Image: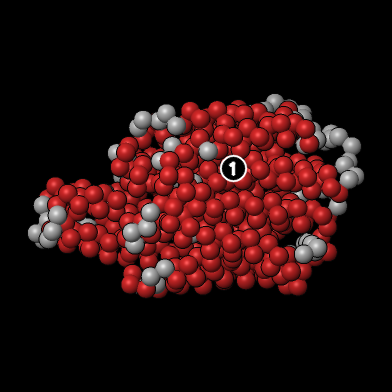
Amino acid sequence: MTTQPPIHSPARRWLILGVLCLPLLVTVIAATVLNVALPDLTEELGSSAVQSLWIVDGYSLVLAGLLVAGGTLADRVGRKRTLVIGCALFGVVSLGSVLAGSAGELIAARGLLGVSAAVIMPSTLSILRNVFTDQRELGKAVAIWTAVGAAGAAAGPIAGGLLVEHFGWQAAFWAAVPVIALCVPLVAMFVPESHGYREGKWDIPSVLMSLGGIVGVVYAIKETEHGVSTTAVVALLIGVVLLVAFVRRQRSLTHPLLDLTLFADRRFTIGAICVLLGMFAQFGPMYFLSQRFQLIQGYGPMAAGIALAPMMLAVLLATPVTTRLMLRIGLRGTLVTGFATAIAGLLVLAAAPASAGYWPLGLGLGVLGLGAGMAVIAATTTLMQVAPPERAGGAAAVQETGYELGAALGVAVLGSIMNIVYRAGMTDLPDVPETAQHAAHDSMAAATEAAASLGSPSGTALLHHAQDTFLNGLTVVHLACAGALALAAIAAHVVLRKAPEVKPDALVSSH
């Protein structure tokens, strides 16, 4: 591995951290900024429920499939160089996304944004690993980096709500352009260049296998909302075959795209899984709660975004809480505590009745954000500390793949559960015309529109039934997510029982 000489000035190191957090923040916000814009998007572009899921999820899906490739590319051609190129591409695609005139065009634009973000994100974390050579400082820097990313994901709906409320859904794209444009000169001026392993070719077949495998599996999950179909089965088989082929190819290559030896350390493996499930728990419920606030409780896009703020604030609080917990009770205890806290938040959300107003939902969001944030921060810090410095790019790619894949699966898996429950409940409605029933069967947004076109009393009956069915589905979503986190907590407790702990002195921060 080759790098520039170490940076000795503490002020310069923390300045670099700030510069690296800026493009990270923009790319993470992009994953959730459209959540509160979905009702407007659905109405203007005429997107179906499945298309709406792809508009939200396509970005994270492509990003997750290409992160390993992006991390390896950065190691070989230069992390600073790829960061600058990625920022420029992200800005251009964001500007072009404003011109999308159909759901298909917007899905394609979101996919291209995912490609550019896959170049940006691994570079930021691997550069940090190179700049902060002191383990004490590295623990704090990684915790801050993780908190910025998680808070950005939670802040996305707030930013999206403000923009959509005043300027329309297109603003969710063009607003990123001036910020990302600022990143280019800042990175060029302050961030040092560094490389990882540079031997061997950048293996394009491995890139295609990883992308195709992830897209195939998640597409199959999305298709199950309509029942088990031939398309879903074929997509699943193709995805699994491609992922198996990807793993086999990595084992046979002298210079693989993904260094599988990193997973020999059980702390690294469980850390990657916990990052994925922590983001799964944040993104999935947030996607549907933003719709509940708008379609059932009557909030505008801006108010709906602000209503999700407790999650963002709780994630920021999770940084100092996590560093202290890891010092006192270690990785295993912190992960179990984080997941248990997140489960408590999900149970509060599941128990909140429709008539209870906002506060039970705000409380549940805050507790969920705190717990999921603790798990993600602890897992990320562990990933970067147990990986050798020369493998920082690979470790960063694994972390961010888990981060983005968790977000994508959260929306896809929980979205499929929601749609199955919702569609099962939207059948055989008396006194409602068949055409309106058919329209309402697609989504809660479509039901709201169909009810408005009918008027009273049929429209009112249809709307109330759709709202009750949606809330029932949301309860199932929260309980299913809590069950997944319970399994993760058990796995972390069992697998890490005999694993050596990460040195606690490396995690102590000054706050």
**Left or right, residue 70 beside residue 277:** right
- Does residue 136 appear left or right of residue 313 in this picture? right
Q: Is residue 340 visible?
A: yes
User: Is residue 195 positioned above or below 374 on the image?
Assistant: above
Vertical relation: 151 (above or below) 240: below
Depth order, front residue of 315/469: 315
Residue 463: which quarter of the image? bottom left
Q: Is residue 383 visible?
A: no
Q: Is residue 235 left or right of residue 113?
A: left
Circle 1 Cα neighbour tier, 10 Å, few/some/many (<14 / 14–19 / ≥20): many
Quadrant of the image containing the N terminus: top right
Q: Position of residue 129 (x, y in %)?
A: 78, 46
Q: Camera-side residue: 420 or 85?
A: 85
The C terminus: image quadrant: bottom right
Q: Nearer the viewer, residue 29 or 435?
A: 29
Percent across and percent down for residue 299 are: 37, 58
Quickly name the residue at label 1. Answer: 26
Residue found 54% across the figure and 69% down from its top? 367
Residue at the outermost front position: 166
Q: Position of residue 238 (x, y in %)?
A: 45, 38
Query: Residue 70 at x, y = what percent?
Result: 64, 35
- Which element type, helix, strand or loop, lies under badge 1? helix
Residue drawn at x 42%, y 68% is 358
Q: Dividing the picture into quarters, in which one does residue 424 lie?
A: bottom left
Three-letter residue code for mark 1: Val
Seen at 38% across and 46% down, the residue is: 38
Q: Nearer the viewer, residue 368 or 455?
A: 455
Determine whether, in the image, residue 36 is placed left or right of residue 506. Answer: left
Is 180 drawn above or below residue 497 in the view shown? above
